[in-house]
Image (cartoon, rainbow, N blue to C red):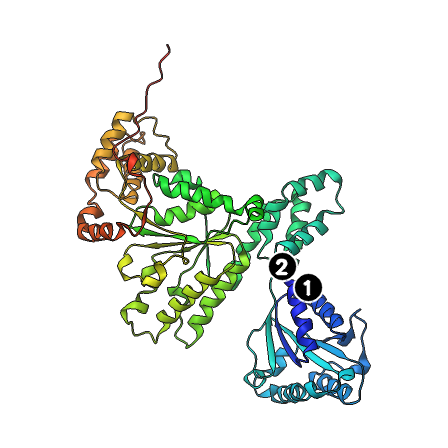
Amino acid sequence: MRSKTMASDVAALLRARNPLLWVVTREEARVERYLMEAAAAAWYVPYTWDVAQGCADMTGKKQPAFGGTDPGDMLAAISSRAESGKQRGVWIMRDLAPWLEGPIGITTTRALRNLARTLPGVPRDSAQAVIVLTPRASVPEELAGHATVIEWPLPDREEIADVLDAAVEALPDEMQLGANGAREAAIDAAVGLTGEEAAACYARSLVQLRRIDPGLIAGEKRRVVARERVLEWVDSLPGGLDAVGGLDLLKNWLGMRKLAYSPAARAYGLPAPKGALLVGVSGTGKTLSAQAIATAWGIPLLKLDLGALKSKFVGDSEANIRKAFGVIEAIGRCVVLIDEIEKSLAGATQGAADGGVSADALGAILSWMQDRKGQAFIVATSNDVSVLPPELLRKGRFDEIFWVDLPTPTERAEVLLAALRAHGRDGGAISGEDIARLVDATDGFTGAEIASLVPDALFTAFADNGREIDRDDLLAAAATVVPLSRTAAEKIEKLRQWAQGRARPATSAEVVGTVPVRRRALDL
């Protein structure tokens, strides 16, 4: 597991006599266990220190002789032990970081810096090392040359599995069988949570439901996203891909990619899919598809708004973007929507006077998309691919680029029926011939324009004594629409020319012109 690998790295750093390790984590208790294992593996005796109880040994017993609750006194005691030839020791400092900030932290910072300079030369038998345990990643400039920064990872699947096993091992046999039956789903749901959060969610699920419920556990991730404030949690689309009309080739492709997340696929060595870029006309269901994927795959949907991460302060924009990437990697399996990506990155290719923020954002995104190891599935949408940088479009960033054109006749019928179902109408009052006539009337409409006909028709029918909508209501609504294919005909044609040979069609050509007609059932 990743934490054991990290502990091995810490042990190697201690044996190499690195005097100051800066460990970044929110999980104090979990990480301390691994740090103590690493200290023992490097032949050090581990101690902890905080401002409440002072120094304590690895069993939690206070050691007042080694130093009190004042950080300066504790650092002086460590220095004294190194000079007097005492036993080797690793000092895990829980609350030291706040004492190193601002003018009041000058004395403590200097004491720690002096210690970091002298400890590498201490004889082997009295070697000492300091580990600063903190959720803050920023190291004071004065210590940057001495500190080795380690960002401790969240629990991986193997460690989460241990947490799950510990939660269910004392349960009655019938409850254990229920938990084990949902084992893989429960582990996937908790990936991205801290060890304590995962344990608390498992316990809550068992208390409330008498079983492990992956849905309840995944809900905790929403609070994680809200806490970090760099991503937006988006509600997925009820009905999944069935609620999206048409796009049969895209749906088939997504169905195959979903298989990559199964245990059998992991054992087979199938790589996790990276994502897809959906290019096409506005209103053709690109964003809706991202919401549907999250529902169909049973995973969270996160929206990454690159524009909202920009800041007026130098460096803040890049920090926000990298923080967002960190949250995405921590969440584990999820769909990440980058809507209208060309607008967020326009400054990187058009020379916007933003101090290079857009160019830096592009560089961060390209590096992350190429090198990331997580299981996030990226869905980026674009209405104007001509302004996107070529390096974003090459293989390796996305698994596939799909071209989403105006809906074909079959797709127009499917979109209309899906819109009727979404508004609680199954379309029973509208015959197959009516559907065919509506398909003809909506020639050149986008999917969004077709879907908008249903609420317009509902308003008309409700105003007419609350009757049920019919074909004429929908035709009247269609007559008032000036479709995008007419107002932006040149732009759409230019996009079609670009897509030829550069993108995979989201709809198969075979469905063109075949409108589904409802057939009357006969008693024969």
Amino acid, disc 1: Arg
Quadrant where the image shows the C terminus: top left
Q: Give residue 458's mark.
A: none
Residue 238 image point, x, y percent: 44, 41
Q: What residue did someone put label 1 on?
A: 30
Residue 288 lies, with reference to residue 473, above or below; the image says below
500 left or right, relative to 394: left
Amino acid, disc 2: Pro
Q: What residue did someone put label 2 on?
A: 155
Residue at position x 28%, y 50% in the image: 501
Residue 111 image point, x, y percent: 66, 88
Image-quadrant location for residue 444: top left
225 left or right, relative to 456: right
* Disc 1 residue crowd, few under 14, some 14–19, many 20+, Cα 10 Å: some
Quadrant where the image shows the N terminus: bottom right
| Circles 2, 1 touching at the beta carbon (< 8 Å) | yes
Task: Tell me the element at label 2.
Answer: loop
* Disc 2 residue crowd, few under 14, some 14–19, many 20+, Cα 10 Å: many
374 left or right, relative to 62: left
Question: Mark 2 to mark 1: distance in Å?
Answer: 10 Å
Q: How many marks?
A: 2
Q: Nearer the viewer, mark 2 or mark 1?
A: 2
